[in-house]
Amino acid sequence: MMFGDLTRNDKLLFLGFTIAALAMPLLAWPVGANYPDLLQKFAIYGIFAIGFNILFGLTGYLSFGHAAFLGVGSYAAVWMFKGVTMNVIPAVIFGVMVSGLFAALIGFVSLRRSGIYFSILTLAFAQMSYNLAYSVLTPITNGETGLQLRQDDARILDRMFVEQTEGLPSTNLFGLEMSGYPGFYFCCVLLIVAFFIALRIQRSPFGMMLRAIKTNQVRMNYTGFNTRPYALTAFIISGMYAGLAGSLLAVTDPLAGAERMQWTASGEVVLMTILGGAGTLVGPILGAGLIKYFENIFSSYNDSLLAESFSFLPDFLNDALVFVIGPFVGEGWSLLLGIVFMAIVIFLPGGLMEGLARIHGWYRGRGQGDAGRNVAKQAAE
Amino acid sequence: MDVILLQLLNGLDKGGAYALIALGLTIIFGTLGVVNFAHGALFMLGAFCAVSVQALLTISKKVKDESIKFFDAYKEIPYLEAWWGDTGAMIIDYAVPISILIAIPLMLLIGLGMERGLIRYFYKRPHAEQILVTFGLAIVVQELIKAQFGANPIPTPAPEVIAGSANVGLWVGLGESVVYPWWRLIYLAFAGVVIALAFAFLNLTTYGMVVRAGMADRETVGLLGINIQRRFTIVFGMAAVIAGLAGVMYTPILPPDYHMGMDFLVLSFVVVVVGGMGSLGGAVLAGFMLGILQSFASMNEVKSILPGIDQIIIYLIAVVILLVRPRGLLGRKGVMES
């Protein structure tokens, strides 16, 4: 029944996605990204972006405070590790639930307004949480240092059932340590589940309702629908996704800091979603992967490495290339990101997915004349 | 009583910066209907005008240090000092006030360029896309500044003459306990003058009257044969100048670094929302009000009753205002109320 009412295309999409996700280490191998730390990031930020897309892509509400839920998820998960057990299942569940509650609270207030006011309200709440996490809530968040595991943590369940060892314990799934590839596959399975849920939401009457809110909320209200509960549900679901991503960050590396909640972090998930294509299913994951990949590659480069990689060129060309590209790598990676982002918003508001659709349409249009061009137009829309 | 006066002054100068940035933001929104997330970047650019002017004035040459006899020692002397002696030193000392003269035309050009080059293509696009593209622009500007000037704050002191503090307490008959830096008082006065000029321009000149008419009903003004778009572009440039000047003057208070724009932007947006989108008076009122409230909330007496209140007071007020009076304190009825 789970897959019964999906169309054939959707089944194929899901199948394709599952295979691609599981084979990610292989797919990432040619571009040199096949090490677990980075792959984990792909999966985790993919989940974050899928969740953000459920809110922004479907309902059109642009939240500028989503990192708050990510941070809350991280804190909750680390507290579970500290207080109860190093097993990751309770931590993830707790993280998702806490951030869901938090999202319900913030969403209830923020969704009373729409448009730019909504953006600013969410931004205000996120900044509030960030400031509080840094100052008054230090007993819970451990302030600037960030929340970390300690030798003398309670870990009630672990102390009862598991033999204590020297040194800090590591996160595990019933004994399987959550670092390296096991950690990646844990995140990967959750990514697939998250994708499946998002797919179901998008194809359901509920998803239709959300898209109607984006298209024309006023008309929805006039026809007698109260749109707020739907938008709130979307907001909570999206907050839970962020919480899931946050707790997975804690699973792969058990510490949590307030900087995860800063508004630049909220900006990052917006960038990912827009870059890939808001409102599409695969786009946000693509965007998250691309940003994390290039961040990893470019931010580690510097001028001398750059000169080395162009060393096959004659000297003057090499120098010129280093001079041109130099400012955009290493520290300057954010500059490149900003420029690309602006270009996307200006020329391709639908993100990379729209770009792909256009190329696809153009390709078909060339073969089949006018009829094909119309198909292309529809595909792009 | 002393404490209250001191906190009031503290709040007023921070409020001055908020009010100036928020004024520009709200002018842009009222005229062009554009939500400009890059306005903080303009504030920061203004601050870095002062940094650049200071760097230009202190270009130095190496000379032999005669006071050290045992070995060859060199010291750097700015060319200005080498050429003109004390006059040169004084010019360097006044780097920040001098940079105001440079910042005005420069920021005007930047503002006009930004409007013609980018913003005008976004009039008809949804607010979300305006936010996103100006957000991207802000990142780009910020990173360029970081690449050029580095990530650390750069001290740009006020002129020597006014480096000290004023005994404000004596003026109002409270004894000598309330002292306050001169530069901050100057900043406050400066903010007042700029705000007054902006209001005078919009309310007392014919040009300003046409702009206000355009804010109320752009189409009709256009039908009367006035090129309202051109005026709006110039107004955008002026908003950039106001933000830039706020930045120039703020440098002695807070050594500028590349992310100061973003820090102020978030707060300024909150200020605009509290004051009312597109309402000039609202932006100024809310700017000063929030500055003062924030300063009072950071008093130890208040913090002991409500811990952490100083961190969140501004946001808290914004939330309350948006929920009970969405158009803001002085916002016009029906503008962006949903």
Image: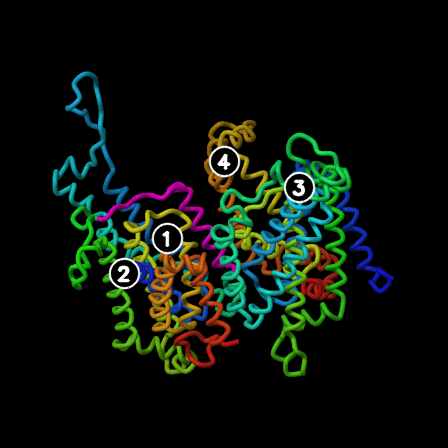
In the picture of the structure, the residue carrying the numbered disc 1 is B44
Nearest the camera: A9 or B75? B75
- Chain to which mark 3 belongs: A
The residue at which mark 4 appears reads as A321
Q: Which of B140 and A170 is in front in this view?
A: A170
Residue type for callout 4: Leu
Nearest the camera: A54 or A379?
A: A54
Q: Residue A252 carries which label?
A: 3
Give me the chain letter of mark 2: B
Q: Is mark 3 on a helix, strand or loop?
A: helix
The type of residue carrying mark 1 is: Met
Q: Any mark on residue B9, and which? A: 2
In the rendered structure, which disc, 2 or 1, sits on the residue that comes first in sequence?
Answer: 2
Q: Give the range drawn in magenta.
A: B132-158
Q: Where is residue A243 in the image (x, y as percent from the top left)?
A: 64, 54
Decide which of A159, A16 is in the foreground and name it: A159
- Residue A226 lies in the magenta stretch: no
Dot 2: few (<14), some (14–19), or many (≥20) neighbours within 10 Å?
A: many
Mark 4 against mark 1, which lies toward the viewer? 1
> Tag 1's secondary structure?
helix
Distance Cα–Cα, label 4 vs label 1: 30 Å
- Can you say whether B179 is above or below B154 in the image? below
